[in-house]
Amino acid sequence: MNIVPLVDRSMTGNGFEPAANASLYAIVAEAAQRNPERHTLAAGEDMPLTCAEFDTRVRAVASALLDRGVAAGDRVVILGRTSLEWALLDCAALAIGAVVVPVYPTSSASQIEHILRDSGSRFFAAETGEDAERLTAAGAAEVWSFGDIAGWAAGPLRADLAARVAQVTVDDLAMIVYTSGTTGLSKGCMITHRNMYVSAANTVRQTGALFDGTTALALPLSHVFGQTMLFACLFGGARTHLLPGIPDLVPALARLRPTFLALIPYALEKIRKHCRSLLTEDAEREAVVTGLLQLTGGEAVAPQDHPVAAALGGRLRYVISGGASLDDSTAGFYAAFGTVILNCYGLTEAATAVTVSAPETNRVGTVGKPIPGTAVAIAGDGEVLVSGPHVSPGYWGAAEAQRPVDEAGWLHTGDVGELDDGYLRITGRKKEILVTSGGKNVAPAPLEDRVRLHPLVSNCMVVGEGRAFVTALVTLDAERAAAWRLDHPGADPAAEIRASVEDANSLVSRAESIREFRIVAGDFTVANGLLTSSLKLRRAAIAEVYSADIDQLYRR
């Protein structure tokens, strides 16, 4: 099956660019042609498939989709956790020009119904029977199982498959990815084959030889970050173990021994808390200081002979971290055990990657430099603007009239930042910057990140818009809090957490510091509508649910 190579690997000055007559599937086909025996994707901790084996399975699934009436432009919903079947269906649908519509497994019934209705999807796949029932309840007709996908992967190939693949162009629609929806209904962001290719391939180019290694991908493929990392791994030749989620990743690290990972800060915090059983509090504090000194000195040390390094697999050198802000102390913690965090920045409307920190030029506190072919600017009000071939052409369905790009061709990100010697530093989000009654601008994320590092804390939201001073709502990790109370009968966890609040206050001025905090009942979760599917705070919803607690904070 002849596939036109996506790009001349000599690269252009503006970065990797795809050929006009190729889909994202050509990354898979090209790898099979160039390196047929090289290992690529694996189901969990199994032996990875070779590039040739994966390509054959993708083509078999693509043939099965055509047999079932899927045509170019048809929307295909996929609901499930990250798996080999997810990746097979993903690549197969894209190969024939169908449009993938990912849905988070944690989505509510109303969110699923909105996505199905707004996308106009005709075909559906689900990981579990329960997932299939949720799709059916939202209006889906027949729902394929991931077991069906696995069976199709061993099936025959259609004679007309190559011709159907050749009809897909680089500017055809590849995905409709629904944004988090922190302030209302999620919007369907259109991602073309070009958008995703440029984002994935130039992330590989930016990071040098990073992707020529072993990784475990536990990011949800329902998120554009997970999609970009999947295609970056396929493009860069990484040996990639696909795992359902972070709970599966933590115990697998010691066995899989990855050389690099891609994670969100929430996952890095969870793994750090897990590793606390392997060292004392004093040792952890010392590790943070040591690690930050190493990072600011620009040195990437080799993994240390320490139980924490062993728990991370023993050879984990780098973690690409994106999706939210990361506390510097967490970067220092990992660096002390030989793992350097490479912060990156992006958004759905730019197919994830805008800037990526590179191993050789990593700078603490920044999110790196723009990937090749990308331009970044700062508007007069501090908003980060982006331009490049990975920027989405717009929104689908109900949000079609909204334009993320202005007349000059700049994507308005909604994030506030600054450029320093080409490095981007994110300082807040326009809609999340709090302005106190005294006129002080407060970025809540750094405070929240630091408080959330306390072992008893599950989540934290800073409050202060239009108020005289800043306060915070704190939720407890139910399991850890129960164990703590058994060890400290009659004690108040607030006294324990106050030290963490004071630590967070050390990051900011007195006017920006948290004056009061309150431990509130329950937690902020996706299920109760207080977190988005990508674990972002729904601030307005939280403020409404906990309005009485907020009133108590200011009544004092």
Image (spheres, rainbow, N blue to C red):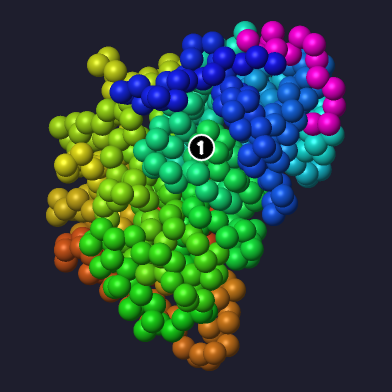
Seen in the picture, residue 104 relative to 469 is either above or below; the reply is above
- Answer whether residue 553 is visible to the viewer in this image: no
Question: Nearest the camera: 186 or 269?
Answer: 269
Q: Where is residue 287 in the image (x, y as percent from the top left)?
A: 35, 75
For the N terminus, the image quarter is top right
* Amino acid at the residue labelled 1: Gly
Report which residue position mark 1 lands on.
236
Left or right of residue 162: residue 206 = left
Q: Position of residue 288 (x, y in %)?
A: 33, 71
Q: Position of residue 543 (x, y in %)?
A: 41, 53
Magenta stretch: includes residue 369: no
Crowding at label 1, few (<14), some or many (≥20) Cα neighbours within 10 Å?
Answer: many
The magenta stretch spans which residues?
153-166
Q: Where is residue 314 in the image (x, y as percent from the top left)?
A: 52, 66
Magenta stretch: includes residue 165: yes
Question: Nearest the camera: 244 or 396?
Answer: 244
Left or right of residue 417: residue 155 = right
Element type where label 1 sits in the image: helix
